Amino acid sequence: MKRFKALDVFRGLTVCLMIIVNTPGDWSSTFSPLLHAKWHGFTPTDLVFPSFLFAVGNAFAFVKAKWVDKPLSEVFKKIAKRTLIIFLLGYTMYWIPFVSWTETGDLAAVPFSETRILGVLQRIALCYFIGAVMIYFLTNKQLIIASVVILLGYWGILSAFGDYTLEGNFARTVDRLILGDSHLYMGNGIPFDPEGLLSTLPSICNVLGGYLIGKYIIDGGINYEKLAKMLLAGAGLLVIAYLWDLGFPVNKKLWSSSFVVLTVGLDIVVLSILIYTIEFVKKPINYNFFEIFGKNPLFIYLLSEYVAIGMHFIRVDGEQSLFSYVYQKGFSWIGPYFGSFAFAIVFMLFCWSLGLWLDKKKIYIKV
């Protein structure tokens, strides 16, 4: 089965952007397009995570062909194993290094009771598992119907049992009831997890959308007619998202149904542009830089997170973190916003260089 370069580039572009938006030198001096929308609304950064899930779906388009000759037990075992590994990697990432600095400058153990259970990788794991099971058992038509049911159902549940505010949304109620406040993300000032249990349901549709488009591309190859249909589908979803936003606002933290439709539509448009500039123009654009990220996506993303965590934990020059120290000494002179952005770019290039080394050594790490 032919691999399409555009799919690898799309995945690599997503990882590249994830690293940039996750590691600014100073969060208080970050350009607004590189920040998530505070609540309702949409920024370019809000597209990054759903695009990663869309790329996971793309990969299923290749994997499903390998499932045909294998018994269900073997397929399910591989899916379950990978799900568990990705989930645990995400969970321990938030817990490591298992100690934290106190106000007195001492180290104290972080108890299990204060750990965040869900998060980015955990959502990827859950969406991977549920998406894989659905893709294994359902036809393409059934997947589309299931996606519509999930998105309408999520809208109905949130509107029936709460509102669309940070404090009163039902997704938060479910997480507090099942997981408890101490296990939720506190970055919004109150216990609320943007990668919570209930809001994981609509995010599965990003994976399913990625699979359906990936399958459409690889079945019989791509031509101008199929590319035009992709663009029309993407544009149609954007119109639906705009109209749905009037009743169920686009909201990344709630992962609203309109947000899913918007991001899948945008991903289809972006992927269409990549395909056109790689497959159809006389002088294809060289996207080799992003392919480096695309060949070891999960490993490079994990690496970036662990390096950043280590830099935040290590103390130098008194009580200053190594992360802050490097930014202050090496980048702050550029100016607050451009310095913070330059730090993120250099950090991303550092991760890319390690990815390049792995590629040259033909080392491809699969979780």
Image (tube, rainbow, N blue to C red):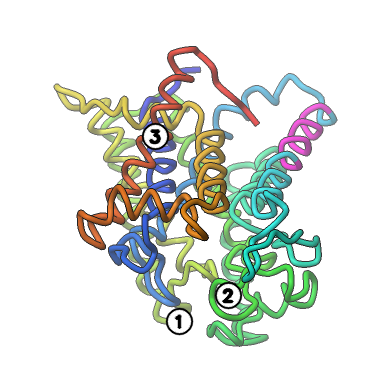
In the picture, measured across the screen, residue 324 lies left or right of residue 115, that is: left
Span colored in magenta: 74-84
| Alpha carbon distance from label 1 to label 2 | 9 Å
What residue is pinned by disc 3? 350
Q: What element carries label 2?
A: helix
Q: What element carries label 1?
A: loop
Please state the horizontal and vertical placement of residue 241, each as a whole percent of the image.
Answer: 40, 67
Instruction: Check disc 1 and give the amino acid type.
Output: Gly
Q: Which of marks 1 and 2 is nearer the N terminus?
A: 2
Up-down: is 234 above or below 177? above
User: Contact, CB < 8 Å: mark 3 with mark 2?
Assistant: no
The outermost residue toward the right is 73
What residue is pinned by disc 1? 247
The image quarter containing residue 348 is: top left
User: Contact, CB < 8 Å: mark 1 with mark 2?
Assistant: yes
- Is residue 149 visible in this depiction of the protein? no
The image quarter containing residue 75 is: top right
User: Contact, CB < 8 Å: mark 1 with mark 3?
Assistant: no
Q: In the image, is residue 80 part of the stretch drawn in magenta?
A: yes
| Camera-nearest residue between 95 and 77 | 95
The image quarter containing residue 350 is: top left
Please state the horizontal and vertical placement of residue 163, each as a whole percent of the image.
Answer: 57, 87
Please state the horizontal and vertical placement of residue 248, each as a whole percent of the image.
Answer: 48, 78
Instruction: Check disc 3 and give the amino acid type.
Output: Phe
What residue is pinned by disc 2? 155
Residue at figure coordinates x 72%, y 41% from the top left: 83
Q: In the image, is residue 190 part of the stretch drawn in magenta?
A: no
Mark 3, Cα crowd under 10 Å, few <14 / some 14-19 / many 20+, is few
